[in-house]
Image: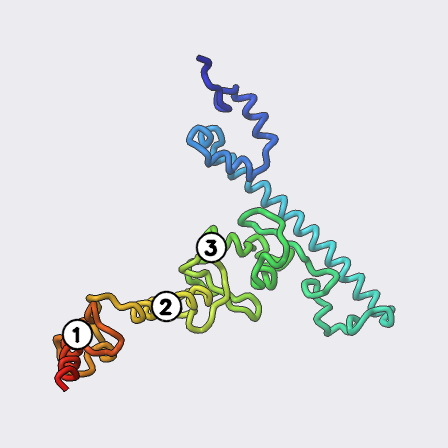
């Protein structure tokens, strides 16, 4: 019977050639498959690859920032010389469009996430990660991370409240997703969806419990016998009718009618 051959039976030189044709994510995923794969790809190699990708992304971001800055400068110069050719108030030097990050032409619509090392659309980040010191080309840009990494890599703790412009979000303690939160949910760290669901569930259970009482269910004021009102009728009788009178009182009522 022929023995099975795996990738780990190949020569080290061949394995090195195979790994050189894989990207960082594939190598990192392969390393996590089993102990032999982890031994084949040392952690130091993963760290070197990651540092190289980060350096490359930072270099590309700085170059992109310089290109946009030049385009922005040229646009302002053109607006001053030919104001009639510029739409709206772009020629006004106090206008918000005279900012590289707000201008519709020079604003970056895709930015780097330095947690997952991906070039992502702007909407994948909260506003605080794409403005201020973490905006394109600024000093803290290398600390920028996307929403998915903030949750999956636990950069944000569960229950953390995150501001996204005029919207307030929370890393929900129940569903572990980044969702909208209201004032009540802020106190407990739960999103509006899960909070609403948790409030509806007890009501549904209570309705079901009261509409279908079990024979051993303790009676409330509404289910006690309306004739004798004695404490020995605190259990809903199994054969009781909807007349809200216990079987003993029902029998007494029938006997009185028959005697009459």
Task: Indicate the quadrant containing the N terminus: top left, top right, bottom left or bottom right.
Answer: top left
Q: Which residue carries the number 3 mark? A: 155
Label 1, label 2: how many angstroms apart (C-alpha)? 30 Å
Whole-percent x, y for residue 14 in the image: 56, 22
Q: Earlier in the sequence, mark 1 or mark 2?
A: 2
The total of numbered circles placed on residues is 3
| Residue assigned mark 1 | 247
Q: Residue 120, relative to residue 20: is it above or below? A: below
Label 2, residues with CA under 10 Å away: few <14, some 14-19, many ≥20: few
Label 1 or label 3, whichever comes before in sequence order: 3
* Residue drawn at (57%, 46%) of the image: 117
Please name the residue that numbered disc 2 is placed on: 204
The residue that appears at 47% across and 30% down in the rendered structure is 37
Q: Are marks 3 and 2 in contact (CB under 8 Å)?
A: no
Residue 18 placed where, x, y %? 58, 27
**Between disc 3 and disc 2, whose residue precedes?**
3
Which labelled disc corresponds to residue 228?
A: none
In the image, taking residue 207 as reference, residue 243 lies left or right, namely left
Label 3 Cα neighbours within 10 Å, binned few <14 / some 14-19 / many ≥20? some
Mark 1 falls on what kind of element? Answer: helix
Residue 8 lies, in percent from the top left, at: 48, 23
Nearer the observer: mark 3 or 2; the answer is: 2
- The local secondary structure at tag 3 comes to loop
Q: Is residue 35 left or right of residue 228?
A: right
Query: Residue sitting at 51 percent across and 34 percent down?
Result: 45
- Residue 137 picture location, percent across and down: 64, 56
In-front residue for pair 69/148: 148
Disc 2 element: helix
Cα distance in 3D space between marks 3 and 2: 37 Å
Mark 1 or 3: in front is 1
**Disc 1 to disc 3, C-alpha distance:** 65 Å
């Amino acid at each position: 019977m022929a023995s099975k051959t795996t990738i780990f039976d190949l020569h080290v030189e061949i394995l090195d050639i195979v790994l050189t044709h894989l990207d960082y994510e594939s190598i990192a995923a392969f390393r996590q498959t089993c102990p032999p794969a982890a031994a084949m790809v040392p952690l130091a190699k993963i760290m070197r690859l990651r540092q190289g990708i980060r350096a490359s992304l930072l270099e590309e971001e700085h170059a992109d920032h310089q290109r946009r800055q030049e385009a922005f400068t040229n646009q302002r110069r053109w607006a001053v010389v030919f104001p009639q050719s510029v739409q709206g108030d772009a020629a006004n030097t106090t206008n918000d469009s005279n900012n590289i990050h707000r201008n519709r032409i020079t604003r970056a619509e895709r930015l780097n996430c330095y947690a997952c090392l991906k070039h992502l659309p702007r909407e994948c980040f909260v506003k605080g990660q794409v403005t201020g010191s973490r905006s394109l080309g600024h000093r803290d840009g290398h600390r920028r991370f996307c929403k998915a990494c903030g949750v999956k890599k636990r950069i944000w703790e569960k229950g953390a409240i995150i501001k996204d412009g005029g919207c307030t979000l929370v890393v929900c303690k129940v569903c572990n997703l980044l969702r909208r939160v209201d004032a009540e949910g802020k106190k407990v760290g739960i999103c509006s969806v899960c909070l609403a669901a948790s409030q509806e569930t007890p009501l549904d259970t209570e309705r079901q419990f009261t509409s279908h009482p079990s024979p051993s269910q303790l009676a409330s004021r509404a289910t006690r016998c309306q004739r004798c009102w004695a404490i020995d009728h605190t259990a809903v009788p199994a054969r009781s009718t909807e007349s809200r009178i216990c079987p003993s009182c029902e029998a007494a009522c029938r006997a009185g009618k028959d005697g009459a």
